[in-house]
């Protein structure tokens, strides 16, 4: 998927969900976490961990701090 296609997809999803579109920093944090989990834990864990990260952030957790903590956890699992 090209960068433009991904940005368009994310904008469309945000509109359907009635939320603000994510920026590059948020996108990179989630994709980095998914990569770490897929490589060190299990591929199916990547989207599920991203989902849990989203729930935590929605409840007020700091995205970057939580992503780093989960990244360390994934690294220990590998």
Image: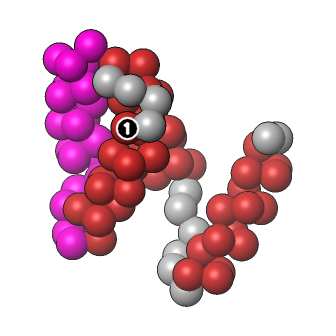
Q: Is residue 57 visible?
A: no
Q: Is residue 55 above or below residue 41?
A: below
Q: Does 67 sit above or below residue 52?
A: above
Q: What kind of element bears circle 1?
A: helix
In the image, the segment drawn in magenta is: 59-78
Q: Residue 73: horizontal and vertical position, in percent?
A: 18, 28
In this rendering, position of residue 30 left or right of residue 77: right
Queried whether the magenta region covers residue 66, the answer comes back as yes
From the top left corner, tell me how far across and down residue 57 is, in percent: 28, 63
Is residue 37 visible in the rendered image? The answer is: yes
* Front one among 56 and 65: 56
Q: What secondary structure do most residues of the magenta stretch adopt?
A: helix
Residue 51 figure quarter: bottom left
Report the side of 35 relative to 24 (left or right).
left
Residue at point 18%, 36% (across, down): 69
- Percent across and percent down for residue 64 are 29, 46
* 18, above or below 64, in the image: below
Q: Which residue is mark 1?
A: 45
Who is closer to the viewer here, 16 or 20?
16
Task: Using residue 13 as the reference point, say whether residue 60 is left or right of it.
Answer: left
Q: What residue is drawn where x is 73% and y is 51%?
A: 6
């Amino acid at each position: 998927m090209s960068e433009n296609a991904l940005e368009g997809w994310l904008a469309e999803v945000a509109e359907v969900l009635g939320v603000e579109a994510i920026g590059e920093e948020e996108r990179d944090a989630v994709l980095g976490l998914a990569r770490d989990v897929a490589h060190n834990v299990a591929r199916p864990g990547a989207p599920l961990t991203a989902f849990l990260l989203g729930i935590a952030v929605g409840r007020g957790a700091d995205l970057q701090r939580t992503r780093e903590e989960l990244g360390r956890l994934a690294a220990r699992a590998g």
